[in-house]
Image (cartoon, helix red, strand yellow):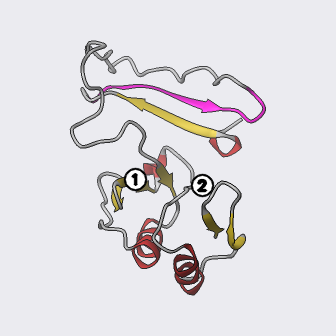
Amino acid sequence: MNARDGLAIQVSSSCGVKLMQRIIRPGLTTPGPPRKRAPSQRRCSCSRNEQVQADGRRTVIPRIITDDVAGLVRFLKTVFGAGGEPQSAAPTEMTMGDSVVMISDGGGAREAMPAFLYVYVQNADETYERAIAAGAESIEKPMDMPYGDRRATV
């Protein structure tokens, strides 16, 4: 079983210590066992009342592992007006509205894996057309949903 078969979750704290990485396996309700920590990794000493994410960060930040960081950055800029520039020594951080999406090639430690983002935009139809013009493949054309959203999937 590898991350392509499920969802990789990386858990960190603001003191910079990676606490664990787990893989959620399809069909299971609980995560698989944590990967072993390197002996040099220390445990976080943050108290439960401290802010656990760095200033200005949300609790959850999607991170996409791709074989084409520059291509995905161009696509997000073209389709969503995202801000950010490719980085080589750290994940690229793209801003989209009030959110950040991290993009990297996995640094040789992780393989590219599927990702799915639900992005709120001003006009789903126009955004869909920009995505198609930028080379995306249509999965769902724009349509009204019973819960009130108008959505399209590429």
Q: Is residue 22 above or below residue 45?
A: below
Dot 1, how many residues are within 10 Å of its Cα: few (below 14), some (14-19), or many (20+)? Answer: some
Task: Name the residue: 61% across, 20% down.
Answer: 33
Q: Which circle marks residue 122 in the picture? A: none
- Residue nearest the observer in this picture, 45 or 128: 128
Q: Position of residue 79 (x, y in %)?
A: 47, 76
The reply to whether callout 1 and callout 2 are in contact (CB within 8 Å) is no
- Residue nearest the observer in this picture, 83 or 124: 124
Which span of residues is magenta-colored?
Answer: 16-28
Quadrant where the image shows the C terminus: bottom right
Q: Position of residue 72 (x, y in %)?
A: 47, 69
Q: Position of residue 88 (x, y in %)?
A: 31, 59
Q: Which residue is under mark 2?
A: 116
Question: In the current view of this chain or complex, which residue is farthest to the bottom?
Answer: 133
Q: Amino acid at mark 2?
A: Phe
N-term mark: 1 or 2:
1
Task: Name the residue: 34% across, 41% down.
Answer: 58
Mark 1 to mark 2 CA distance (whole Å): 13 Å
Q: Amino acid at mark 1?
A: Met
Place residue 83 in its image quadrant.
bottom left
Give the secondary structure at mark 1: strand
Task: Name the residue: 36% across, 68% down.
Answer: 82
Q: Is residue 5 above or below residue 148?
A: above
Give the secondary structure at mark 2: loop
Q: Is residue 39 left or right of residue 8?
A: left
Does the segment drawn in magenta span residue 21?
Answer: yes
Q: Position of residue 7 (x, y in %)?
A: 61, 40
Q: Is residue 78 above or below residue 39?
A: below
Q: Which residue is under mark 1?
A: 102
